[in-house]
Image (cartoon, rainbow, N blue to C red):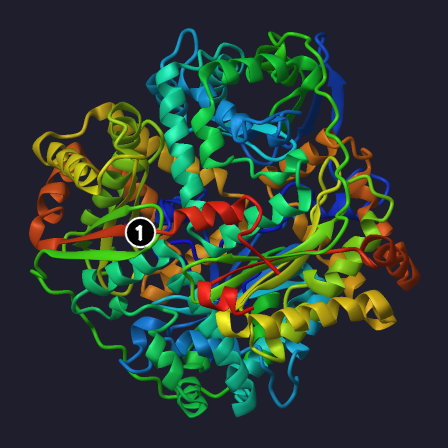
Amino acid sequence: MFDLSFKPLRMGVYCTLLLLSSSIFAQTTFQQKTLANGLTIYVKEDHRAPVLITEVWYKVGSSYEPTGDTGISHLLEHMMFKGTPNYGLGEFSRLIAENGGQENAFTYDDFTGYYQELAADKLPLSFQLEADRMRHLNLKAADFNEEVKVVREERRWRTDNDPQGKMTEQFLSQAYVALPYHNPTVGWPADLQNITVGDLRAWYQRWYAPNNAFIVVVGDVKANDVFNLAQKYFGPLKPMTVPLAKPQQELANPGARRINLSIPAQVPSLMIGYNVPTVISAKNSIDPYALDVLSNILAGGDSARLPQNLVRHQELASGIGINYELYKRFSSLFVIEAVPQKGVSTEALEKAIRAQIKLLQQKPVSAAELAKVKRNVIADNIYQQDSIEDLAQTVGILTAVGSDWREIDNYVEKVQKVTPLDVQRVAQQYLVPTQETVGILTPLPWNAAAAAQSSNGGSYVR
Amino acid sequence: MSVKLIRFLFLVLFSCSILAAENKALVPIHEWQTDNGVRVVWVPLIEQPIVDIQLLFHAGSAKDGAAFGLANLTANLLAEGSTKLSADKIADNFDNVSAVYNAGASQDATILSLRSLSKDDYLNPALSTFAAIINEPTLPQQSVARLKNEAMQAIASDEQSPDGMAIRVFYKNLYGTHPYAHRPLGDKNTVQAIQRQDVERFYKQYYNASNAVLVIVGDVDEAKVHSIAQQLVGPLPKGQKAAAIPTPTPLAAAKNITVPFPTTQASIRMGTLGITYNDPDFYALAVGNYIFGGGMLTSRLFQNVREKQGLTYSIKSAFVPLQVQGPFAIGLQTQNSTRTQALQTVNTTLADFIAKGPSQSELIAAQKNIIGSFPLTLSGNDSISSAVALIAFYNLPVDYLDQYRSHIAAITVADINKAIATRLKGKPLVTVVVTEKDKATNG
């Protein structure tokens, strides 16, 4: 599907694992250079095919936004396609398309990014256009007035009319207490009514500068050529004074939280989340890796504990997964998401999940289970070696949150060091009531008869 | 963290030299038949220590009969037990060697896939488990009941989304009594009614050598690939090729259907019958559709509905080729109050495109994009495996990938006009609008 801009699903299952187990153990090495204006370029040469991916990342996203302006980073991302004095409305996309390129952009809490995939000789086109819109965006009121409507439609589509999207948004709004991650990247509905083009101009001036950006290029290129091209196109841009990002911390004891959401839906669902550290925020550096192993012990494949016990043996869940992002600027969440099996209550399912957590706290995992997870982390990496996109994306995220590409190999090494006692300890330390948020989606009565009738031919034919 | 979900498109295995050498095949496809008649297609790729295997049967949801959802349920039941292995053991066996197994049905095919590392101590255990699943499934009663419940939950999840509902109603009304009218997941009541003996009958009827295509892509040599084929599909009975899917009947008259739904945003699907992979207008319509509604950020639909009026976030059109005529469909979402305005714009844009066709400059821009981005469309082993499976399953010419760009380059404005006139001019459309009840009844 095509998305001009999009808010990644924050609760996609296994995503962190897939992403970060993606590029390792091949001794991943990037070449990097920082221009005088502060723009850093990271390059990985990969000559298997005559293509490349190039991504421009800005260190700004929804976690930088003040209340009242939520969604402004994502709105700006949309406006980045609306032209400059040099390239009018639609020119950017027309040029990329005619040169055989594919492009898109993404906004999340800690970053905003723009990318093109192109034939290997088309990098100058990308750099010329990206350098231009880094500092010379039009941001016309008339364009904004149309585009903000598009973003409101995007919000209706992703969140307001998707029961699970709505559940996730409200869950996160409670699960993060002192951290700005409690705001949705797409923005709260009222803010999408009130943000002005003037606000966007100020936001653009504040954050879109070479010293607050970096570039990742992976593909059939020579690093020195890329550095020279970057100097040619981005070198002339002046650095700006960028606000200092202030350190923020989650509460030590945010307390047990519980949300019951009743909305029109057909399927109940359950989320149980815990406030946990990231690789950036952890006081004990092994903890995020041990938590990642823990998530795999529970849900990293059909033979993992939750699918085996709760889906197959006890028939309490029709689907279950875990999301844990190890790489964010601040701390993170460890979230178990589950859909009850038909006819099973969310209470019964919640109880069974708690029993599984308790087991992990009481008894160390077996050597065989741990070995399986460690093997799979390495294998997943090999499987994804051929995805140049994954590599670029991983390096981008790591850099945007304050780590760097060296973490790709470090991740695999750290996972190999995790012991059964580490896993037990993090289960005891973090999966506790004071760190817990539970979200329950209870479907409101649905006009099932009308819906069924419609799907059999339409209840109302004009 | 799924930052981007779009699949990426890199030619992992072909070096530049292969692309440059025009006479050489883009993808080195080898094929033969096993003794019992299974068509095997092998693409050796040695750069990654990975093997991708796909086993396809002409046993998609179009073969469900009245038991909508049967093909998909059968595929999902295979890993629930074999004569020698329990479901837990099967899951363990795959996970222990980091193998990734998937099963499911589309409208035309049942597809079983395995991804494994190519080293023998990983690959061999994965293969023997895969072979057991294919050839000796026990289809246990307890699992039939459980997977039916899981399928019904998945259907409910589909039906609670305006898009999911719109797609269901669109297919139902476009195809009527044709077997493409239902989704591969099936309907709740039809899934509920499926019995174990239905599954067993489906397995016996369609999981046979005459009905199968095996695709093996990756780091295996010729001797190994023959032994893999023998191990996986050698035991399959010869059986009979599945009967052809009937040709769908074109709509006699336009259908406008409004589905009342608790939503603040209307989901719209509209369209008519489209094409097969072997359609003579395949390339003309690929280019024509790119211009009309397929081209990301540049198409006429995108410009008219999103860029000029801000009525939608996502809008797209597609000809979906299938074994027999798949749909031509347009999809979008817009808030309930602007659905009439959006529909009018789509209809005007379509009428204008049918009447006047594309301009020469639109044609050139489309060809440049489709041809220029072609190298991106064969990504790693995974997507090469998918492309080759498509060629094998639908009996496309073996040089399909090699010739793709020259076919696109040869298309003229007149070709597009002729193809669009044949396919879309004067054709009645199904239009489905899933929207809030008040808005629905107010028209």
Q: Residue furthest right?
A: B414
Name which residue type carries label 1.
Pro
Q: Is B13 situated above or below A82?
A: above
Residue behind mark 1: A445
Q: Is B274 situated above or below A124?
A: above
| B239, A87: nearer the viewer | B239
Residue under the image location 48 percent in, 26 percent down: B73
Asked whether residue B299 appears in the rendered view, the answer is no
Q: Secondary structure at mark 1?
A: loop
Residue under the image location 75 percent in, 31 percent down: B246
B40 relative position to B167: left or right? right
**Where's residue B405, x and y in %?**
81, 51
| B245, A166: nearer the viewer | B245
| B57, B149: nearer the viewer | B149
Residue under the image location 43 percent in, 28 percent down: B192
Image quadrant where residue A331 sits: bottom left
